[in-house]
Amino acid sequence: MDHTSSYEPQTKFGKWWDDRLPIARLAHGQFVAFPTPRNLNYWWTFGGILTFFLASQIVTGIVLAMHYQPSAAEAFNSVEAIRRDVNFGWLIRNLHAVGASMFFIAVYIHIFRGLYYGSYKAPREVLWILGVLIFLVMMATAFMGYALPWGQMSFWGVTVITNLFSSINEIIPGLGTAIVEWLWGGFAVSGTTLNRFFALHYLLPFVIAGLVILHIWALHVAGQNNPTGLDIKTKEDAVPMYPYAVAKDAVGLFAFLILFAWFVFFLPDYLGHADNYIEADPLVTPPHIVPEWYFLPFYAILRAIPSKLGGVIAMFAAIAILVVVPWLDTSRVRSAKYRPVYKWFFWLLVISCLALGYLGAMPAEGAYVTWSRIFTFYYFAHFLLVMPIVGLIERPRPLPRSISESVLKSGAGAPEGAAAAPETR
Amino acid sequence: MRVTKASLAALAFLFGGAVATPALAAGDAVHIDRQSWSFSGFTGQFDRAQLQRGFQVYKDVCAACHGLNRVRFRNLFEAGGPEFDEESVKALAASWPNQITDGPDDQGKMFERPALQSDPIRGPFKNNNEARAANNGALPPDLSLIAKARTTHYTGTWWAHPFSMLRDIATGYQEGGADYLYALLTGYQDPPEGFHLAEGMLYNAAFPGHQFAMPAMLSEDSFITYQDGTGSLDQNARDVAAFLAWSADPSLNERKRIGWLVILYLIVTTGLLYAGKRRIWAKAH
């Protein structure tokens, strides 16, 4: 967002430093004086929540790596040693394992918020695509991380998912097998696979951090979207990030941390699977192999398609399709708040994703498959049919003239409140 | 900047979706009754006397076949567990029948020695093959994590499932393993008419598939009598399930105690931040 820097170094040293490396000026411009729309609601606090969880996962992960042993013989034992013998190891391990789930809850809310308010539309396409990339790398990181405790679900989850690549054999015979063996580092999932997954699991979070920097950069070029979807036009439409947006972000973050702490301290195993407390055994296949909850919608899509290759393509397409969303949506209006028809389809998409999540946890048989197909169809239809068509035929509701007008009209910016405040400006 | 009803509903939906996840076994799921445990819920703590009784059942019955390899003797006197007296645990370790293989000694030979308090609680078998050979091909699993490696499965209707999950989250239900172990130990029955039982197997109502290889070591007629003279199958099963829940999760007491403080801190801080946010935003209008 273009705005003139109001940074004034207060000390002699500050001035000296500012002439040489104006990093404080950068931080001041981007994170203190940065203009944020004054009507952001609490759904906008999830960006900050996600930043917190990235940092938290990296910190707890590094501590865990100090005690973890990435070998087939010792991985499971070392995780148990962390739970039992490392000081507060149980806490660090729970923070990391539950933290991954919270990261995904937050990222799904963040993505749906973007979809509802049209945050992907021009000029924010690159910002959105960077977000999709972050999501993709997050999924890879989480998948490899789940392999590390080397329990039964770790082992068999890795076996099933890596085997998906063998479906490429249907296009080029032999290529799929070659890729799978290359991923495994052998002819089966083994300690070698675990070792490389550990290396990549340590690397990818830093790739995410890099992408997050680009994501925030792109955000600060285009400026934040907001519930009205209108651009900031006047000074009255925006407030400086500090203290306004920061104060709100802090409330959102701490409220979310209550949920996090609830799971960490009272339900640490709820989001995992009991079978992962059994050490990996290549000779015993669990009756039902399921991924972690955050992959279940995609797992349901994979199993909804009757052909293996088709299922794999559909699963990856379900993520890839998000990249082209900015061009599939034909509406002139960003925010679904002013789109009476599209709004309903949005909630249908949310319901479809939740239903796919439920169906992904169920066995692939009978009515579960039928419903998986119905919701998979809607998932793709939403992007390929609803977004282009509804955007063209829908008559949006009248937009407010400006952000500040919308605030005053909704009553949230109660003028009486301003009068009552002792320090009115 | 109001959180609208619709957005609250959306959060509930998303939250529901987040929890609509732990994978469930399919049609073969057996309904397991929930028991009341001293360590259930968010205020729960282990009952020290119950853990001591449970250990007695483990020692006198289960230890004949099952190891407890991730639990060390010292854990038996540490805080949050059975909290036996340290000297008696040392004596117990020294007299534990399944000794520790150590070495090599000066002659290059491995040797057996009595366990120390820092040693794991070994079962009678040196390895899985020996265990299988002695048990008709079945493997008696190590019990250290059994209460976490087993759980119960939802068996109700699909539409009530999300509500059941929300209730479990709100009440902090994590005792599926103990519920299952209790049901298993009290679940030996005569097979129903027409049920084909494989050779050497016993019918157990709680076990998936009902074909269970473990003999009924506890029954209505044969159970462990505690020091105070009481004892029954039901009591033994309950106590050993609680003991195994501790073996799988020895930090539970500390976890739940700290948890309360953390939640309280977060609620108060969120409230203060919200009050601060309102003051700050009052200036913006």
Image (spheres, helix red, strand yellow):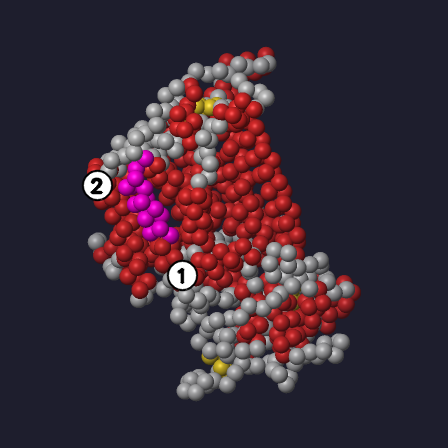
Where in the figure is residue A276, as x and y percent of width and height? 49, 60
Which segment did they paint magenta? A338-354
In front of the other: B142 or A105: A105
Q: Quadrant of residue B266?
A: top right
Q: Are marks 1 and 2 on the same chain?
A: no
Instruction: From the image, tell me which residue sits under label 1.
Output: B159
Can you say whether A198 is above or below B203 in the image? Answer: above
Of the residues shown, which amino acid type is indicated by label 1? Trp
Measured as percent of width and height from the top left, residue B172 is found at 56, 57
Identity, as a three-letter code, of the amino acid under mark 2: Ile
Image vertical order of residue A3 relative to residue B266, above or below = above
Contact (Cβ within 8 Å) of mark 1 with mark 2: no
Quadrant in the picture for residue A373: bottom left
In the image shown, does A297 or B98 lie closer to the viewer?
Answer: A297
User: Which numbered circle lies on residue B133?
Assistant: none
* B116, A331: nearer the viewer: A331
User: Which element type, helix, strand or loop, lies under badge 1?
Assistant: helix
Residue ID for mark 2? A389
Q: Main secondary structure of the magenta part?
A: helix
